[in-house]
Amino acid sequence: MPDSWDEFMDHDPIGESLFGSVVREFRHLAVAAIDSSDDIVAHGTAMAFCLDRDGRRTLPDRGWDQALVWAHQDLVRGTEPDTACALEVSVHTEWLGRGLSQLVFAALRDAARAAGFTTLVAPVRPSDKHREPDTTMDEYARRTRADGLPTDPWLRVHARLGGVIERVAPASQTVSGSLDEWRSWTGLDFSATGPVRVPGALAPVHCFERQGIAVYVEPNVWVRHDLT
């Protein structure tokens, strides 16, 4: 399904290693929207981990990546999960702007509730943050409109569905690569040391010209949904 994810986001090594194997174990938490021809036009994925255990109990700074690691560890050890976690909502490029993301996330909530979970968390990637890569995520996520809802459209969807911002995950995903790799992913030059503002990135990518690498550390926002 064609979606709007930027290519560099496909190169998070945690996601590349664990996403497929983890979400396969939680097919009952996955949802999809289809059109009249039975083609998928949007989908959502989720998994679960045990939050109430030593060394956890607080949603992690390393957000999306750490949640996947926890879920994988719990599957390997046979630990019973107590918290559902949404990982992704994707909409077909031709169906953007029709409100499907809200419908899909509401369906993820319903699937988690049907599976017996009382809490669904999500390391949210605010949809308009890429327009302000130099603004801190904490400042951005706390902005509200006159009606009290978040300024960001995707955070606003979560709020309307009952989600509450819990904290920022400052290092939710990390993508590193050679300068040639970043050039191929973005079409940008990456020839000088310093921050590079990449379209679609929520924060600057840091280029280290002498070392021949660049690193992107993406902040997300932990949102908690009470399903009771």
Image (cartoon, helix red, strand yellow):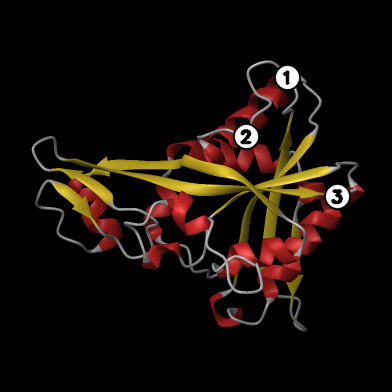
Q: Residue 201: percent from the left, percent from the top?
A: 37, 58
Position of residue 148 measured from the top left corner of the image (x, y, whole percent): 65, 67
In the image, is 86 to the left or to the right of 119? left
Q: Which residue is label 3 attached to?
A: 227
Q: Is residue 50 above or below residue 228?
A: above
Q: Amino acid at mark 2?
A: Leu
State whether residue 176 is above or below residue 199: above
Where does the image place residue 65, in percent across and percent down from the top left?
A: 52, 37
**Residue at x 72%, y 61% (from the top left corner):** 105
Mark 3 residue crowding within 10 angstroms, few (<14) / some (14–19) / many (20+):
some
Callout 1: helix, strand or loop? loop
Q: Badge 1 is on which residue? A: 53
Residue behind mark 2: 59
Q: Residue furthest front?
A: 146
Name the amino acid, label 3.
Leu
Tell me, yes or no, if residue 40 can be seen here: no
Q: Residue at x 84, y 53 (%)?
A: 111
| Sequence-first disc among 3 and 2 | 2
